[in-house]
Image: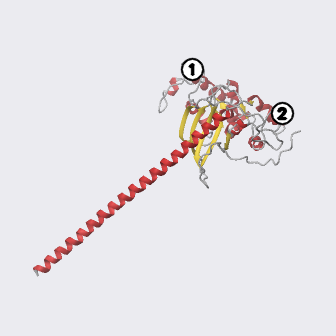
Amino acid sequence: MRCSSQRGVVLIMVLWTAVVLTVLVTVLASNIRLSANTALHHRTGTLAHAQLMGAVRKAEMELMMESMPVPLGVMDNVDDDELQRIPAYRFNGQSLSLHYPAEENVRIRIYDHAGKINLNRIPRDRLQLIIEKRLGGPDADPRQVQELLAAWSDWTDLNDAALPSGAEDEYYTELDPPYTTRNNQELDTVEELRLIRGFDELFSDVDLDAAFTIYGNSTTVNLNLATREALMLLPGMTEEATETIIAYREQRDIRTLTELGELIPVEVTLEVSPWLGFNTSSFYSIYAYTEEEDSSEARQAYLQVVEVRSFATLPRVYKVHPYAQLPDYAPARIDIGELPAIN
């Protein structure tokens, strides 16, 4: 009886030992598997980051090469009328094939800031036109328009005295969280616009980085480079006119306002023409991201804002955003057909 009892105790001890060892082995295996997955994801992330940054560097090289003189007789890209396409106009957000190709799964889009509205160079009367358009055009409340203009003036003037219906520190320090007015004629970032009283609501559905810039000295917007977001903010511009311009420039450069007048209604051309120019800038937004199929969500990308002064010096980096939202780069949403030949 005693021997049988001892054998039972030994059996229980063996079973418990087996259970404990099984648990230990399971935990150890889980830890090893977790470590292996962590190492794999770290390697994948490091490789993806290296590919992305490599693509950004190649995009910088592309911009530096753009400032090099073109050899005589070289016509790399011509339209249907055998006219040389202006190479600098390809920096309008279209997916680029670089001279030094990036990885196959990495996409590069470059936006010349000449295609955006410059907040640091916009005259008050033009800002008023944008405000009125955002508030309903002819139906805009004049009092609300003047309040927004006063808030803008108080933010960008050099004193602490509030204008009638304006806003200075007394207003902003009562907010949660509190802050003070800029009191500088130039904004430091595009996003600073949302700090000015009323402007966050005014542009609540606008991608500010896509529509505006603070870099450079241009007071006009180049239609060949303009983002869809910037075009839609221009007074007089309609959605149909915007899509027509985008469809046209996919095939041919817009070289004159006369050419624009043949493309969109005359009344739209007359209203928007004071805003337009054909200059380019030395400031660019480089977007790099990996291609994902069947992605319906707003795409994020690595953003770098640079200034390119010459092909002999590296670009100067002004801004980096690892998770920036891409501008609306979709193709034209209307079909204008094959363009007639230019006589």
The label nearer to you, 2 versus 1, is: 2
| Residue 102 visible within the image | yes
Amino acid at the residue labelled 2: Thr
> Whole-percent x and y of residue 318?
56, 31
> Whole-percent x and y of residue 87?
72, 37
Residue sitting nearer the eye, 292 or 271: 292
For mark 2, does the 10 Å Cα neighbourhood hold few (<14), some (14 to 19), or many (20 or more) residues? few
> Whole-percent x and y of residue 16?
23, 69
Residue 145: quadrant of the picture = top right
Q: Which residue is tagged 2? A: 258
Residue sitting nearer the eye, 266 or 209: 209
* Residue sitting farthest toward the front: 72
| Left or right position of 169 against 310 | left
The residue depicted at 59 percent of the width and 48 percent of the height is: 103
Amino acid at the residue labelled 1: Ala
- Quadrant including the C terminus: top right
Mark closer to the chain start, 2 or 1: 1
Residue sitting nearer the eye, 73 or 262: 73
Spatial CA span between label 2 and label 1: 44 Å
> Whole-percent x and y of residue 7?
16, 77
> Which dot marks residue 194?
none
Q: Which residue is tagged 1? A: 162
Callout 2–callout 1 Cβ contact below 8 Å: no
Q: How many marks?
A: 2
| Left or right position of 275 against 288 | right
| Residue 211 visible within the image | no
The residue depicted at 58 percent of the width and 40 percent of the height is: 56
Whether 298 is drawn above or below 119: the answer is below
- Quadrant including the N terminus: bottom left
* Residue sitting farthest toward the right: 343
SS label for mark 2:
helix
